[in-house]
Amino acid sequence: MPQPPSKPPVLTKHQAQALLAPTTQLEDVFFGFYHWLNQHPTEAVLISLNHEGGTGTPNDVKIQQLIYNLFNTELAKRYWVQKNGTVCPLTRE
């Protein structure tokens, strides 16, 4: 009997050891940022992500890949400017 596909791992939000909004995925939060940015095109959002030890989530290659993928979707590329070794404008050319 075929098995249903396993769900991909998700990134969740924690404050120290407390899990916040267990049914909301980090991608959902970013969609909210994108919607807000669409409504406020002259604004910018600064985001800081970090791994909190003691949450039960390892800081491993899988987590790093999820974060990388979050910033490299076609949708995300419309909102994030990624340049190495240079300061870039916050507006698209």
Image (cartoon, rainbow, N blue to C red):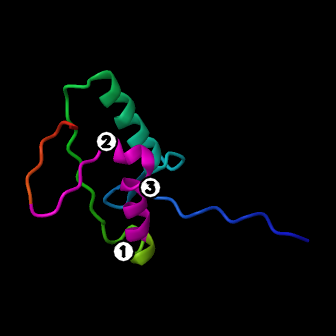
Residue 3 location, quadrant: bottom right
Number of callouts: 3
Residue depicted at x 35% and y 71%: 54
Q: Is residue 56 visible?
A: no
- Which of 76/56 is in front? 76
Residues at marks 1 and 2 touching, judged by CB atoms closer than 8 Å: no
Q: Residues within 10 Å of mark 1 (few under 14, many from 20)?
A: few
Question: Judging from the image, what secondary structure is the residue with disc 3 in?
Answer: loop
Q: Residue 91: within the magenta? A: no
Where is residue 71 drawn, in percent x and y? 36, 54
Instruction: State how far apart marks 1 and 3 are (Cα).
Output: 13 Å
Give the amino acid at mark 2: Tyr
Q: Earlier in the sequence, mark 1 or mark 2?
A: 1
In this picture, residue 48 sits left or right of residue 55: left
Query: Which residues fall within the magenta stretch?
Result: 63-85
Where is residue 34 drawn, in percent x and y? 36, 35
Q: Earlier in the sequence, mark 1 or mark 3?
A: 3
Give above or below for 9 relative to 33.
below
Q: Which residue is mark 3?
A: 12
Residue depicted at x 8% and y 52%: 87
Q: Which mark is residue 59?
A: 1
Residues at marks 1 and 3 touching, judged by CB atoms closer than 8 Å: no
Where is residue 7 drawn, in percent x and y? 64, 61
Question: Judging from the image, what secondary structure is the residue with disc 2 in?
Answer: loop
- Which of 86/38 is in front? 86
Where is residue 74 drawn, in percent x and y? 44, 48
In this view, which residue lies farthest toward the top? 39
Question: Judging from the image, what secondary structure is the residue with disc 1 in?
Answer: loop
Give above or below for 80 relative to 44.
below
Q: Quadrant of the N terminus?
A: bottom right
Q: Residues within 10 Å of mark 3 (few under 14, many from 20)?
A: some
Residue depicted at x 37% and y 70%: 64
